[in-house]
């Protein structure tokens, strides 16, 4: 039936299989080696060492197979080692791996920029700069917004996460672990209350009025270059803002000459059943940041914005050695083609129906599940002390540890560490979802 020693990744049978203790002996040996040479600041949520993967299954060095509900934090969105991504990247690898786009350009970069212009919201001329990571995209988005507006202020929201570089550390909500002790930090960053319906109970209009009033009091609209928002917050816990919240913020930005930047690094690239989550809220951002899912696991990120904003940066002001690497660009082109050819937006909706429905059933059984939320293949449950909205991080740790032992990889999130997030690849079958939820059900029963 199954053959875990098969030579190619596409031979990875899409099934869960636990054949050793987790982590197994080979993983444990690798972990010993790692601890000697990799700093503790770089953690491992689950120290099983992965040898290969395909679709929604990770295979570790001991032959265990995990149902992957994290996709490397929403990166292998169209599935691990997707055949078209592997083919596109392999072909490119043999032809050209680097020139530096700002020295002698190549077509792949231009095609990715064309795809982003076509698929980000808004029917106007757009331009894209490609970089290497999400944080670098945030840095560039802010930099360009400052140049365009001639202003310094950067507004962000509570519970936001934007990266680990110096500027983005200053933009994150959570100090520990992201910025504790790593200062001094970039200035002119202003953090406003967000919309978090489960906790604040505010309508979108009321939450927006609170955010706007806060920013007008503490900075003043005239000093703000940009407002950076995640349409659905990622690390913060998948907060889906109340209806009308984001459009009201965008309208205020437009009225005040503030560049409205959607950080779609986690929520974008078909994850929520639209190319970009902004579409669910009727947003047309001035700038959209993409990364994570854009290149099927290869490093690539983009800043896509209104042409007149993007062109405010002087020649030579944007770029970087590896930005828009030809192999990453080829992988991204394959991702865009696969989203279209396999109608993957519909797969995200299928996953939402299967997964959210099952989690809502679990919520009826287990009062520790306070909230079930999210859109498409970006779903979370917030765990609380039963009968309250008080965070229950211990339950999150217990559930994810139990699931790992049974071959289900679950990610955590949330400012208080009390959110379980589900970011499966769009290749996951309903059968694997049901099986994973069965394990999670057992995990809750064991609490
Ligand atoms: C992951 C993430 C980032 C940072 O991306 P890196 O590639 O890790 O630098 C920024 N914003 C959001 C919303 C993210 O999820």
Image (tube, helix red, strand yellow):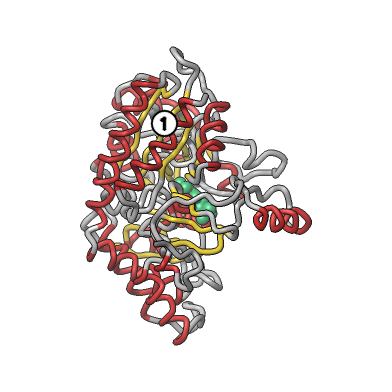
Q: Residue at x 50, y 33 (%)?
A: 414
For the N terminus, the image quarter is bottom left
Q: Is residue 125 above or below residue 226?
A: below
Q: Is residue 355 above or below residue 340?
A: above
Q: Residue at x 59, y 60 (%)?
A: 61
Q: Secondary structure at mark 1?
A: helix
Determine the residue located farthest toward the bottom in the rendered image: 95
Residue 60 location in percent, x, y?
56, 58
Number of numbered discs visible in the structure rendering: 1
For the residue pair 159 and 428, the one nearer the viewer reads as 428
Q: Provide the residue designation for mark 1.
A: 441
Residue 278 location in percent, x, y?
30, 45
Q: Is residue 139 visible?
A: no
Q: Is residue 283 left or right of residue 216?
A: left
Dividing the picture into quarters, in which one does residue 177 lie?
Answer: top right
Q: Is residue 248 above or below residue 207?
A: below
For the residue pair 225 and 275, the one nearer the viewer reads as 275
For the residue pair 391 and 224, the one nearer the viewer reads as 391
Q: Is residue 191 left or right of residue 251?
A: right
Q: Is residue 104 visible?
A: yes
Residue 70 location in percent, x, y?
46, 48
| Mark 1 residue CB less than 8 A from any atom of ligand 1 | no
Determine the residue located farthest toward the front in the rendered image: 1
Q: Residue at x 30, y 22 (%)?
A: 203
> How many residues crowd mark 1 within 10 Å: few (<14), some (14–19), many (20+)?
many
Determine the residue located farthest toward the right in the rendered image: 36
Determine the residue located farthest toward the top in the rendered image: 387
Dividing the picture into quarters, in which one does residue 361 lie?
Answer: top left
Residue 426 location in percent, x, y?
33, 53
């Amino acid at each position: 039936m199954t053959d875990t020693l098969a030579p190619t990744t596409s031979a990875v049978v899409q099934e869960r299989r636990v054949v050793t203790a987790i982590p197994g002996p080979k993983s444990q040996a690798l972990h010993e080696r790692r601890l000697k040479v990799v700093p503790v600041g770089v953690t491992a949520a689950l120290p099983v060492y992965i040898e290969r993967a395909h679709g929604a299954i990770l295979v570790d060095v001991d032959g265990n197979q995990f149902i992957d509900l994290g996709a490397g934090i929403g990166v292998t969105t169209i599935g691990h080692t997707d055949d078209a991504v592997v083919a596109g990247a392999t072909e490119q690898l043999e032809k050209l791996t680097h020139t530096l786009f700002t020295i002698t350009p190549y077509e792949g970069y231009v095609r990715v920029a064309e795809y982003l212009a076509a698929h980000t919201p808004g029917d106007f001329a757009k331009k894209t700069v490609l970089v290497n990571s999400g944080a670098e995209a945030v840095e560039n988005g802010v930099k360009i917004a400052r140049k365009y507006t001639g202003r310094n202020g950067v507004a962000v929201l509570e519970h936001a996460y934007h990266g680990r570089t110096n500027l983005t550390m200053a933009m994150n909500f959570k100090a520990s672990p992201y910025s504790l002790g790593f200062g001094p930090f970039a200035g002119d960053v202003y953090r406003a209350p967000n919309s978090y319906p489960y906790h604040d109970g505010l309508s979108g209009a009321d939450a927006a009025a609170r955010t706007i009033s806060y920013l007008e009091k503490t900075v003043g609209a005239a000093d703000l270059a940009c407002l950076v928002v995640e349409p659905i917050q990622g690390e913060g816990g998948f907060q889906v803002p109340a209806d009308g919240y984001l459009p009201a913020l965008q309208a205020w930005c437009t009225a005040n000459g503030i560049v409205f930047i959607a950080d779609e690094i986690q929520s974008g690239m078909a994850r929520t059943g639209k190319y970009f989550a902004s579409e669910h809220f009727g947003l047309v951002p001035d700038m959209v940041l993409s990364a994570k899912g854009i290149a099927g696991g290869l490093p690539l990120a983009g800043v896509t914005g209104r042409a007149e904003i993007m062109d405010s940066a002087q020649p030579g002001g944007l770029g970087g050695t590896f930005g828009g690497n030809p192999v990453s660009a080829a992988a991204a082109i394959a991702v865009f083609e696969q989203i279209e050819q396999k109608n993957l937006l519909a797969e995200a909706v299928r996953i939402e129906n299967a997964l959210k429905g099952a989690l809502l059933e679990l919520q009826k059984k287990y009062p520790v599940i306070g909230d079930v939320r999210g859109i498409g293949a970006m779903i979370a449950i917030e765990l609380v002390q039963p009968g309250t909205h008080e965070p229950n991080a211990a339950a999150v740790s217990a559930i994810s540890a139990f699931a790992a032992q049974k071959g289900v990889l679950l990610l955590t999130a949330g400012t208080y560490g009390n959110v379980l997030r589900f970011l499966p690849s769009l290749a996951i079958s309903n059968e694997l979802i049901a099986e994973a939820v069965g394990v999670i059900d057992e995990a809750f029963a064991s609490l």
